[in-house]
Image: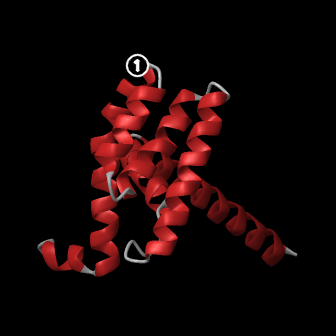
Amino acid sequence: MMGGKTSAIAAGVCGALFVGYCIYFDRKRRSDPNFKNRLREHERSDLLPADLKDAEAVQKFFLEEIQLGEELLAQGDYEKGVDHLTNAIAVCGQPQQLLQVLQQTLPPPVFQMLLTKLPSISQVITSHYLFLTGLESARSPA
């Protein structure tokens, strides 16, 4: 009887220590100033087509992003709509022409929002491409 009670107490203490460690780690992770940026980059890189050299996959991704962006803008969700349009511009073969069309069709504040997001998505695309091709590991110092 005494061994069972001791085991239960030990298991409870171990469980409490584990939960405490999880809370500590989560708080430390969330207090990191770059946490939100890394999370956004990770979410965006998951959205990108796996192979940027596969023209069919890129074209499908482009069309889906344009369609999603237009739908979200029509619903009034400008933030997410602009995110999808930015993804489409990033993989577009002729981004200048697409930007000209969008400038003519989007309200000026929405187009400005789009322009401010372009540098961040192009950086994500570049890092995604480098990761897929293995160039990132060769570039970064070990």
Viewer-proximal residue among 37 and 59: 59
Viewer-proximal residue among 88 and 93: 93
Q: Residues within 10 Å of mark 1 (few under 14, many from 20)?
A: few
Q: Residue at x 37, y 76 (%)?
A: 53
Residue that protrudes farthest toward the left in the picture: 141
For mark 1, give the secondary structure.
Answer: helix
User: Residue under circle 1?
Assistant: 108
Q: Residue at x 54, y 51 (%)?
A: 65
Q: Indicate whether 24 appears above or below 47.
A: above
Q: Amino acid at mark 1?
A: Pro
Is the image coloured rainbow, by chain, by secondary structure, or in one colour?
secondary structure
Residue 64 image position (x, y, % from top left): 59, 55
Residue 33 visible: no
Q: Indicate whether 41 appears above or below 79.
A: below
Q: Residue at x 54, y 47 (%)?
A: 66
Q: Indicate whether 19 appears above or below 77.
A: below
**Residue 140: quadrant of the picture:** bottom left
